[in-house]
Image: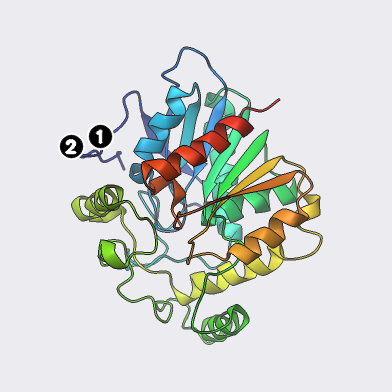
Amino acid sequence: MKLVGLDTNPVPNGAVSGSITTVDGISLRFARWRPTARRNQGTVCLFHGRAEQIEKYFEVVGDLRRRGFAVATLDWRGQGGSDRRLRNRRKGHVDSFTEYDRDLDAFMQDVVLPDCPPPHYALSHSTGGLICLRAAQSGRARFARMILAAPLAGLGPMNFSQPTVCRIAGFLTAIGLGELDAPGTKGTGIDEVPFETNLLTSDAARYSRNVEIVTEAPEIGVGPPTVGWLYAACQAIREAADPDFGPSIKVPTLVVAAALDRVVSLRAIETLVAELRAGAQVVITGSRHEILMERDTIREQFWAAFDAFIPGS
């Protein structure tokens, strides 16, 4: 599937896009760009959160290219222009985060290593952050450094405790109801939530742009997670909370958290960062979950942290 450009969100020039196939036969959409600055500082691999797509990050691609980085990115299975697991394309679903592991491995092997200049860095958001941590912990990561924006280290505030939510999701999945929408998520797609009540960003213009993307190109949008996706996330979060997980990650990592985040758990992020061998954390006051989609004053703080950490020495 080709990249979708809008008047308000044009495709950055020089895009090379296409598809790759994972070991389990899933087709993934990817895109890559050369830097626009004369200097070449390597490649930033951009990993999105759940229910996002390449088009949402065109602005970020431009920010990185002006800094002298090539950029490579992909749509995870089940979202954007990649294969969907279920007949209902609105449902975001995986059975296990090992499926995302295969996506990352195929992307690195078929896109980044052959065609993108080293060194390679990871910049991720939310679910993408947890996937990157899994790759680093298992020794599969090929990144010189990682920046994780609001990584999914734990679920945000809910009516029930995280253990209770995970038990319910596990039970429903076990009895064959894993493809149902997760309880309480109906009507929570970005194209269904007005700006005034959204939990993602305080920037009205960027929120409107992201809504327009999936309104004009509904085929790349996705709705709420399924029960099965939620249970898969719970399992991955539990694995990342193991006392041996953090200390086994050797890749220098900067975690940028949002002080007003109600999608992922700040406490879980702090606990994880404290366990990392070469980890540090920055908390941005006033930011909601999608730091890179926030107001300019917040994004400037993120990019200042980025510039101080990458490429590093």
241 left or right, relative to 204:
right
- Residue drawn at point x = 55 percent, y = 85 percent: 168
249 left or right, relative to 33:
right
Instruction: Name the quadrant of the C terminus.
Output: top right
Mark 2 and mark 1 in contact (Cβ < 8 Å)? yes
Quick one: 208 or 9, which is closer to the camera?
208
Dot 2 amino acid type: Asp
Kindly identify which numbered label has been placed on residue 10: 1
How crowded pointer 2 is (Cα within 10 Å; few <14, some 14-19, many 20+) is rated as few
> Could you tell me residue 217's position as x and y percent?
23, 51
Instruction: Name the quadrant of the N terminus.
Output: top left
Dot 1 amino acid type: Pro
The residue beneath circle 2 is 7
Picture quadrant of residue 191 = bottom left
> Could you tell me residue 27's position as x and y percent?
44, 48
Label 1 secondary element:
loop
Quick one: 171 or 165, which is closer to the camera?
165
